[in-house]
Amino acid sequence: MRFTAAFIVCCLLFPGATNAGDAYTKRAQGIFSSFTSHNAPGLAVLVLKDGRPVFQQCYGVTDLRSLRKIDAQSNFRLASDTKQFTAMAIMLLVHDRKLHYEDHLTDIFSDFPEYGRAITIRQLLNHTSGLLDYEDLMPKPDPGVSPDHIPQIQDKEVLDLLKQQKTTKFPPGSKWDYSNSGYVILGTVVGKVAGTSFGDFLHDRIFAPLKMSHTLAFEKGKNEISNRAYGHSEEGRRWVETDQSPTSATLGDGGVYSSLEDLAKWDMALREHTLLSEAEYNAAITPVNVRGAGPVEPDGKPAEYGFGWFLNPYEGHKRMWHYGETVGFRGTIQRFPDENLSVIILANRSDVTPAELALRLADIYLNPTK
C-alpha cells in the first residue's frame, strides 16, 4: 500500500482549497449561487486536480434542528455511490483468492434456488444477473402508513426474499438491468466469504487502510455517524426531514456514509492503485458487453458500465462515474482519469441533480474556453 506526498498536500490544502480571486473559482461559484441559504439543507462540492483540491465549497446546513453548517467533514448517505465500495470489497476477495468472478450464487449459498446456478459474481457486479427487484417483492404497507413507520428491510431479508423466487427477469448475462438486488446480494457474499460482517470488512480492508476515519456502512444500533447530514425533501414551500425509508437499512446497494474529506482519500487511492494493482482493478473499468439491451443512464441515454461505475465518456473525455439517489439525498462522483480530474457533489436535499451540476463544473476545468 502506497501513500504519497500528494495525499498529505491534499489534506493540508483543504482549508484554503478555493481561491476566491481565481477566474475558474468565480465561474464555479456561479453554478451554486442559488444554494447559499444559511437555514436550508444544501450540498458539499469538491474538485480535485492532480490529487489537489482546486475548488471546495459547502452550502447550507446538515439539519434544520441544529442549523450546523455543512463542511468537508459532514457525512452524507452515499446511496448508490456505495456500489463502488461494494465492488472493491468483492475485488479484494478475488485478490485474496477466496472468490472468483465466475463463481455462481449457488457456490456461495448452497440453499439458493436452482435459478442461482446461472448467476455469476461478475453478472452481479455489472448488472446483468436479471435478479428481481427486492423493492417489488417487499410486503406492501397498509394504506396511509407513513414511510418512517414501515419496518426497514435488512440485507438478510433481501436474500431470503430472493430465495423464495423461482426465476429471473431474463436469462442471466443476456441483458443489462440496473439491480439494487444484485448489490445487496454482493454485500451478503462478502460477509459469507470473508467470515465477517460486510461493514467490518469495508472498515478493515478499505476505510481504515485509507484513513477514511469517518466513513462507514451505517447500521442502526451498531454504529453512529459523526457529523451527520440528514436528508430533506421540499413539501410545498418548506423543507421536511426525510432521512430514512423502508429500504434505507440495506448496505451493499447504498448504505455507506462519507464526506468530502474522506472521498478525497478514496479518489487518491484509485489514482495511486493503493488497494489493488492497476491490472487487477482494470476489471472494474472494463465495460460489460451484452447481446441484448445494454447499459443506460437514469434518463435512458445509452451508457457503459463496469463494476460499480458507469464508464461512458463525456464529450470525448474518458470518464468513470456514478450517482447516488435515495430519500432526502442526492450525490455524484465524476472521475476523468486522463486529466486527473475528479468532481464530487454530496447533497442532503432531493431537489437537485448533482450529475448535471458536476458536469457543468467539470467543463470549467476540462474546457476552460467553452
Image (tube, rainbow, N blue to C red):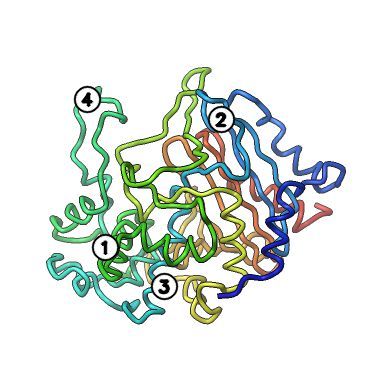
Q: Earlier in the sequence, mark 2 or mark 4?
A: 2
* Residue under pointer 3: 91
Answer with the quarter of the image where residue 179 lies.
bottom left
Residue 39, numbered label: none
Residue appearing at x 38%, y 69% in the figure: 90
Q: Earlier in the sequence, mark 2 or mark 1?
A: 2
Residue farthest to the top? 237
Residue appearing at x 77%, y 47% in the figure: 16
| Amino acid type at mark 1 | Phe
Q: Position of residue 363 (x, y in %)?
A: 73, 53
Q: Secondary structure at mark 3?
A: helix
Q: Earlier in the sequence, mark 4 or mark 1?
A: 4
| Amino acid type at mark 2 | Pro
| Amino acid type at mark 4 | Pro
* Residue under pointer 2: 41
| Amino acid type at mark 3 | Met
In space, the residues marked 3 and 1 are separated at their CA atoms by 26 Å
